[in-house]
Image (tube, coloured by chain):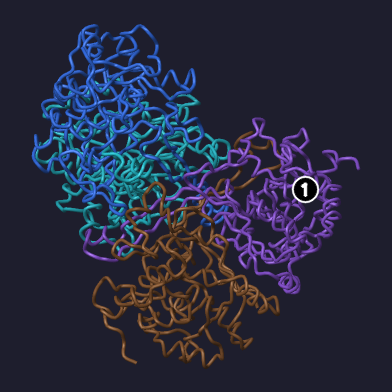
Chain colours: A brown, B purple, C blue, D cyan
């Protein structure tokens, strides 16, 4: 298969578009593909009751940026001795600890990208104009993370590309091509279908924690050539232990710096789950010899924002 | 039934204690009651695939404190034009919007209380010493919200006390007694059991949004007399559209300002879900004539904190 | 004297303009009027060495909004036991306390308004285009508070309008007219001149702390009719225990909600000092029977921002 | 001169102590040495009216930690289009830009250290107990930066140690000894006296910006042997383009990691000004051949904190 050119990828904005598919005011994009029937079917995948978290720990004290991508940090401000501070030390046997939390939402923690995160020629998914609906005071008013406030609960499928290649992790800069996705499906005996959450295991988070950040900031990930696959299979959300886009992307123009993010969010209305922790999931799938499971991710219902720090799970 | 005295409630620290029950170093408390078997059984409750979010929207622009309890706010700081800001306006057809978020974690949003939130005589659940494990730099190191990082996934049961009393909401200050819980179970034909998440519908959030904050800051909620019920039934977590404790609590001493929080968190190791949105859930349960459902809450995996803003769901 | 009409005030954008006066790229506006000679002359006003701070205390625990204007708050996050947290309690006789601080910069604290704060038809002072120079990532790049980073050090003059009227504070909503400024000059035997910082004492902060916020959110302050006075006298900065503009402003159009801010910042390039504490200064001036003094305000040198929380002083 | 031993330095807590000197409840420490008479005399040093800022720019986008000391950052959150966001784009010709600011107060910006910053055996200056007066809710209640809210306005003296040694900057790790201070006084024809702010020019900020951070994180600065000099001369505050303490300090025990900070703040009650920008000041002093000037630093009046980001100036 030959790789798409720059013009081909820009052509995807039209050829792969979901604009208008679910109505002119639709804000859910590919989450429309998750029906009650789909959730019911996913529930049937719960057999052992075993649960695996797919989120990294958020450690304000620790190294926070496992991808070396310059992603922002979380901070934690403790309030210790809340009661004694008000009424005097020793005045009460009861006391409390609280905190406030500061999160750079598209940061190094596992998070959901909402549809207002990227735009092309000033337009978000379904043609919403950034100039018209985004402002500093009210945030992203038309496409917000709270649109996904009923959660992403559906069948999850893991395609383990590292296992396909027989390595613990893909080398930085390795592109994943559509034929790799097809080969993984065949090897695992699973088929990605409409309304699924597709998770891609590259081993990249584990590699960086073990080997350190790649000095050239390369990352493995999907090549833009995978975009038609995502549209044809009608994936509801894409997640991975990476930022999805192979880096560098293989395109010279800066505008195609991250084509999976760009075309995925804008044209497909495809929700993305960045920087997941998939090591334990890959091991569990291999041990159970099944790569499909009940998946749940419950983003916070915050209005006017483009992301949510969130903890997705797989339930077997 | 006569109500417990101050001494009786302080006696609960011993008589209802779960300290040591799951080992001297246990940090999970009542979440130990949720087994893989329990999750499997909960999955069998998924029949229609209908989903109901149990979280309030978090609106940084809106009135944020529906309980009038002086709870803190969430803030949102938008980063608009991230790409054009770096390379010049008009230089790229592609652009991005991001944000950072500040959350007063025990604030007016729906949130999970972790076991380090309250202490008695300097001790948290299972005897962990606040002086030893909590500090400003590393937070609450021994009992942290990320201990619940695999999520709270189990059977949920709603006891609808407002419906029991035939009102849309309980009047501010109304105590809920053990006999009310028993009457609701009988009326609904449901029994709260080990490992369940118990949700209590008072209508209080809806009342405050409709009628305004009670000028005396009273709230309906559980009387301390319900603590033995929570322990006997081995509830895994307690949630409600209130802050659980009837306010005022009915005890003169400030130390028993919030006995459900205090004895629940410290003695039982009971996780609490504050300020939920339960109006739609109550309506769905009534329409379906069933008050049990698959429940999921997936707190963020942040280390060293006592809370998580989180979005719980019910799946029917 | 008849009051200016809406059209008259909008005409001030042209008739009172300082655009181009100090060059097309000038970013200092009226601070150009403070010369080394002016500072030398101000130094000659230092006679007793007595110092008076003109800033409110910033109390994160206290009522923070004395003007009832919905102005934002400062927050303080303590880091206690920084050393013991790293190496263990009791391991060092030496320990440290630190904090981080969050400031809503145009908030209820005494602060300096920079020239990028207000714009008219998309233009700031001297014609800088907001679209071109302000963005979320780099802030206000052409007009920033750090342009005033060498401080505002000059002669200060207090006009005590409350004393002129024989009251401790002006009633909320009282407009100050040019003839009031002239009468105060005559009463006090002082003349406002080029490069001076003009401070106006209304008593409004003191009134609000004593009487509470006016339920209609009225404030005393300068009427737009004072704008020609500010331009003719070539005032370098305007400060007061108010937000300068009488509220309501007396104009029906929302666009003239705060004409002193708007025409002052945009047309004159006039720096403003909001929400000062002037009670002690007024008393000192009256006791000394002089209303001129050495004035210093040293804003932080933060790049890309429109304000600075700052502590101005008078030195006698 | 032989250097003091560990025991000698710990002996300074007693021998150099100012505890009780200005009363048992004194919170000002060495700022008591700045009298009205002292300020009057300082005013006589204003001759040319030339002003030099002694603060670094705070650039949230830039490299923020010139000392490579792991010091925290400032953040800026812009609010663009405040008016149009509320009433709709294009509805008003008038609009506003605001921001909020987050400051890690003991960070890489020029800042004042208050007397609660360091403690020894749980005690701050004058014997205030950290356990009793510092808590997370109300901050440092007895010793706070707002105690210096009337500003530090006095005579400033620069001792230019880099010029003394004939270098643009001292090599990282170079200790400054009392004889260096004396030699600089003699070379410059100036004597440090009671109530002065002493500024020490090492060139270290300039060096780091030019050469990069020293890989061993060494810094030039005062050796603990200078502590008696600071006490004998009755310096009111100590500032420098460094963090005062030579790093490493020359003492093996961690407790004497930073003896100038520790003994200065705790025993002397000496206020410290960290991370100043002194390049221009050194050049101006050399050009004018005078190393004394009118000095002003006006910290914010924030209650309960141990520091203030502030912009000090020299006025010639």
The residue positioned 37% from the left and 19% from the top of the image is: C173
Residue C285, above or below A86: above
User: Residue A135, position in %: x, y?
Assistant: 36, 50
Task: State which quadrant residue C235 falls in.
Answer: top left
Could you tell me residue A18's position as x and y percent? 41, 72
Spot occupied by residue B112 in the image (x, y as percentages of width and height): 63, 55
Q: Which chain carries label 1?
A: B
- Residue C217 in which image quadrant: top left
* Secondary structure under the numbered disc 1 in the rendered image: helix
Residue drawn at x 48%, y 74% is A239
Instruction: Name the one closer to the observer, A220 or B284.
Output: B284
Classify residue B220 as left or right of residue C243: right
Residue beneath the point at 59% across and 82% down? A292
Image height of C15 relative to D11, above or below: above
Residue C95 appears in the picture as rendered: no
Q: Which residue is labeled 1 in the image?
A: B161
- Is A108 left or right of A36, judged from the image as shown? left
Q: In which quarter of the image is residue B189?
A: bottom right
Instruction: Please indicate, yes or no, whether residue D61 appears anywhere in the rendered image.
Output: yes
Across and down, in percent, residue B36 comes to 72, 74
């Amino acid at each position: 298969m030959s790789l798409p050119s720059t013009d081909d990828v820009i052509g995807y904005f039209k050829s792969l578009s979901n604009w208008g598919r679910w109505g002119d005011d639709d804000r859910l994009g590919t989450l429309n593909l998750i029906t009650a029937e789909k959730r019911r079917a996913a529930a049937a995948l719960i057999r052992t009751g075993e649960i695996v978290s797919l989120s990294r720990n958020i450690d304000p004290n620790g190294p926070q940026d496992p991808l070396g991508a310059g992603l922002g940090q979380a901070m934690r401000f403790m309030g210790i001795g809340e009661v004694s501070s008000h009424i005097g030390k020793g005045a009460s046997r009861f006391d409390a600890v609280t905190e406030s939390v500061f999160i750079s939402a598209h940061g190094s923690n596992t998070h959901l990208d909402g549809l207002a995160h990227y735009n092309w020629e000033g337009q978000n998914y379904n043609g919403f104009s950034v100039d018209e609906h985004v402002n500093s005071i009210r945030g992203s008013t038309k496409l917000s993370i709270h649109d996904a406030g009923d959660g992403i609960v559906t069948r999850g499928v893991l395609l383990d590309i590292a296992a396909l290649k027989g390595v613990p992790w893909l080398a930085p800069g390795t592109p994943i091509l559509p034929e790799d996705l097809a080969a993984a499906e065949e090897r695992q005996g699973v088929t990605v279908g409409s309304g699924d959450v597709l998770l891609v295991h590259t081993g990249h988070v584990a590699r960086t924690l073990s080997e350190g950040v790649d000095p050239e900031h390369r990352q493995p990930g999907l090549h833009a050539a995978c975009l038609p696959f995502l549209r044809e299979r009608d994936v509801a959300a894409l997640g991975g232990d990476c930022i999805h886009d192979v880096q560098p992307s293989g395109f010279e123009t800066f505008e195609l710096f991250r084509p999976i993010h760009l075309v995925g969010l804008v044209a497909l209305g495809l929700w993305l789950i960045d920087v997941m922790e998939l090591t334990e999931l890959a091991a569990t799938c291999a041990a159970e010899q099944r790569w499909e499971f009940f998946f749940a991710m419950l983003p916070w219902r915050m209005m006017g924002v483009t992301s949510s720090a969130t903890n997705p799970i797989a339930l077997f």
